[in-house]
Image: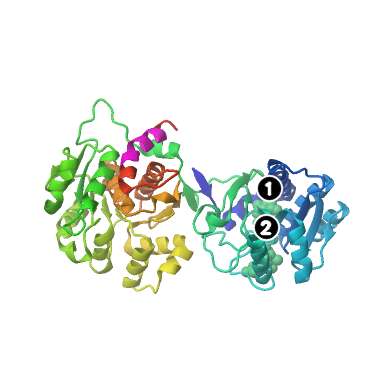
Amino acid sequence: MLRAYRSSEVREAEKPLLEQGVPLMERASFAVATAAVRELRSRGHLVTGSQVLVLAGGGNNGADALYAGAYLAARGASVEIVRASDSVHAEALATAKESGCALVDSGKDGILKAARRAGLWIDGLAGIGVRPPLTEPLSSLVTLLEEERIAAPDEPIVIAVDCPTGIGVDDGALVGPVLTATVTVTMGAPKPGLIAPPASRVCGRVEVADIGLWFTGEPAVATLSGSDVADLLRVPGPTDHKYTRGVVLLGTGSDSFPGAAVLTVGGALGAGPGMVRLDSPEVAGLVLRRYPEVVTGLGRAQAVVLGSGVPATETERLKAPLDRALEEKYPVVLDAGALELVKTEYTDLPSTVVLTPHAGELAELLSARGEGITRQDVEAAPIRAVRLAATITGATIVLKGASDVIAGPDGPVYSQPARSHWRAVAGAGDVYAGLLGALLASAGEDLARSGRGYGKPALIAAAASWIHAEAAHSDGPIRAMDIVDGIPAAIASALHD
Ligand SMILES: NC(=O)C1=CN([C@@H]2O[C@H](COP(=O)(O)OP(=O)(O)OC[C@H]3O[C@@H](n4cnc5c(N)ncnc54)[C@H](O)[C@@H]3O)[C@@H](O)[C@H]2O)[C@@H](O)CC1
Ligand SMILES: [K+]
């Protein structure tokens, strides 16, 4: 599991070490210099003679970059420094100069010329001490450098110290200019913005430098790996039978969208529940032709999936199975059309109800509940939108996208990236809803007992996202049914991880 901690938690972790005189900055800058050497070498360059640009801001982030520049200069690199603040760390600047680094003219032309000379930039403009949007003059400098980076015929290697300058370190938001990194060398632990969208997209490869920090608390944001998923999966044993393995009931598909029933059933069956029931008479024939093992009609279940392929105007029929699930306290997935019910009627839900909107649906839901939030707002700061929706509704929220962002009213936020962007295809969300329903069914009794406010539904949804991403992993075009077909192998790969 990748565990990300907020700036305040990083500072807490750093405190006892600084009190003991542990040279954290030395360790941090050495890690940055080592990463720079490796990046240069991996592209066939010698360190000696390489042109490096150190972008030094006024805080400790700038100091890290300056000390890294000093190391590289001592190894023969030709290092130039852009001093982006009047108050750069004096000692670090003196050390860099003594090692042979040169200050560049801080006018626009001087900075651009130096940027063009350098094949490698070290971004020490701002670290965890800065909340975006950046203010002037840093804002204009970052805009200038980002434009130059994009336009440069030979794109420079950008090593971000701790985080790319300008990202929402603690919430993954992108508001205002940022300097996109090739590699981010982050100190002690990833920060939320390094693993959560959209900021995670400008971080390049994230490397965690072990500088001796120790974290014991719950992370703010986490990303599951295959072995975490394996820990959550219930592998059947000799005493299991179809009812102990979990029964999932689907109220999905309609005359308008019959395929959604096939895709949700396929997604559910792939996860290996004991039984899949389908309560959608108009599409039962179609589903049975493809999946004869499906049982039609209502009946006992440990989880319910409602709404995929059900138009918002036909949600009346979803209320009976929803009421029953709420009464008997087993988990529910509300997808697509069923989200309509949460706008007006089902306003106070337990966290065992999982809503699976995409960005537009989440914005609509939040707006209907009195928050003036647009799709763009959701996309710029998904963690905030998801947490807000979980707080308002009480439910667990899965915001589907290139990275799924998942949160309950409490516990960590999970950010699960796609393995391939080919998965952005019609029907992929239906497959997810069915898959999640089956996983919730196998944990259904436990979840019912744990009740409200327990982070487990979010964890199971994160596992579903991992499996879905793995099943959709592809180097070329895929259809939603290919994701269905990929689920058993994805689960097997988690179990072998
Ligand atoms: N916390 C830790 O454990 C360690 C931190 N280190 C480094 O220290 C960094 C944090 O240092 P600082 O606390 O000095 O903070 P930063 O270096 O992140 O930034 C502070 C500077 O940014 C300016 N600033 C703040 N908000 C701004 C805005 N919105 N627009 C423009 N400028 C803004 C401030 O005036 C100040 O000059 C970390 O990111 C890391 O690089 C490492 O040296 C070692 C260990
Ligand atoms: K930085």
Which residue is at a point 67% across and 68% down the rendered structure image?
A: 144
Q: Earlier in the sequence, mark 2 or mark 1?
A: 1
Q: Is residue 274 above or below residue 96?
A: above
Q: x and y percent of residue 7 in the render?
A: 59, 57
Dot 1 alpha-carbon crowd within 10 angstroms: few under 14, some 14 to 19, many 20 or more = some
Q: Which residues are magenta?
A: 485-494
Which residue is at a point 41% across and 61% down the rendered structure image?
A: 387
Looking at numbered disc 1 in the image, what kind of residue is underneath it? Leu
Q: Quick check: marks 2 and 1 in contact, CB under 8 Å?
A: no
Q: Is residue 431 above or below residue 497?
A: below
Q: x and y percent of residue 115 in the render?
A: 74, 61
Q: Is residue 402 above or below residue 292?
A: below
Which residue is at a point 54% across and 45% down the rendered structure image?
A: 216
Q: x and y percent of residue 317 in the render?
A: 14, 59
Residue extending farthest to the front is 153
Residue 17: give its label: 1
Q: In what element is the residue under mark 1?
A: helix
The secondary structure that dominates the magenta segment is helix
Instruction: For ligand 1, tell me if the residue under mark 1 lies within 8 Å.
Output: yes
